[in-house]
Image (cartoon, rainbow, N blue to C red):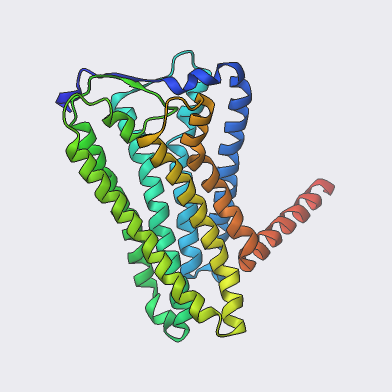
Amino acid sequence: MSNTSSVVLFSLSGFSATANYKSTLVFLILLCYFLILVINLSLILTIIFDPNLHEPMYVFLCNLCINGIYGAAGFYPKFVYDLLSDKQVISYRGCLLQVFVVYSNSKIDYSILVLMAYDRYVAICRPLEYHSVMSVRRTAVLIVFSWLVPLFCEVMLTAFTSSLKLCGSHINKLYCENWSIVKLACGSTKANNIVGLVIISFYCGHVILIACSYIHLLKSAVKSREGRRKFTQTCVPHLLCLLNITTALLFDIMYSRYGSVSVPQNVRNFMAIQFLIIPPITNPVIYGVILTKIRNRVIYLFVTASERFKLSTKV
């Protein structure tokens, strides 16, 4: 990091468009953060405490929710602090840490969605082998790799970025983003470009794997009524979550690299943060509404809690 020691603070200029409605934004952002915590924690606790939900698909969903909370922690507290501050700055180390958390979060999302696609493929296309293929040990190993591989990829990206000599400290976004830092470099960024493209290609491969699994799933599902029922109940929410995160990330990646400065700042701000707001809220809601076991369990817990509250108030 000696090459970048001259850069102590980064300024975040994306907040220039928020001056007239800071109070409204603070309320909405705090509401989003609250919803992310409550919804994801509700699903996590429901899955942990209900033995009937200790199956690979629900364990993967639990990890998706944990990752949602992890990613939100890297963005929301600092974002609210900046909205309430007169100057929006972040330290060099803090900037790299935010880059690491925010973008490892999106990579972990993709890894878990691949595992969920594989789980559904085995459950529908190879039902007799399901329990032997998706054993407890294999499920645990897959979960560990779904976290370690994205974290390792992000460590590589952050390491290459931290080695750059920077000639500026002005980031035209609401938070720190890897490509925004790379664009401030004085020298060659060829190594960063190559590593970035390799990692993007690696995660594009994830999409191809999911697409291949769904081709097999569709072929198998149309053969029987039970197959169609399983596909509708467990695969549709997965596809919706995948579309959700893919669309959000595609906007962010394409705009970061090729976006025009002529686009209004408010539009740029929304495009920059929508993948940090929409998926963490909608993913658990989609699964909680569509998956019967989770929906019934959440309703049962809510009704039980309401009855206990009424009894306690009467006493």
Q: Position of residue 78 (x, y in %)?
A: 45, 28
Pick out the residue farthest to the right: 314
Q: Is residue 30 above or below residue 62?
A: above
Residue lying at 40% horizontally and 62% vertically, measured from the top left: 114
Tell me if residue 152 can be seen. Answer: no
Q: Is residue 93 above or below residue 16?
A: below
**Of the pair 67 and 312, the residue shown nearer to us:** 67
Q: Position of residue 203 (x, y in %)?
A: 34, 54
**Of the pair 114 and 208, the residue shown nearer to us:** 208
Q: Image check: 36 left or right of 105?
A: right
Give the image quarter of residue 255: top left
Q: Is residue 142 above or below residue 175?
A: below
Residue lying at 51% horizontally and 75% vertically, measured from the top left: 218
Residue lying at 21% horizontally and 44% vertically, measured from the top left: 194
Q: Position of residue 29 (x, y in %)?
A: 57, 32
Q: Position of residue 61 (x, y in %)?
A: 49, 60
Q: Image check: 35 left or right of 193?
A: right
State the quadrant of the N terminus. top left
Tell me if residue 3 can be seen. Answer: yes
Q: Is residue 235 above or below residue 260?
A: below
**Of the pair 182 and 58, the residue shown nearer to us:** 182
Q: Image check: 160 left or right of 17?
A: left
Q: Image check: 215 left or right of 38?
A: left
**Of the pair 170 and 158, the residue shown nearer to us:** 170
Count of numbered labels shown in the rendering: 0
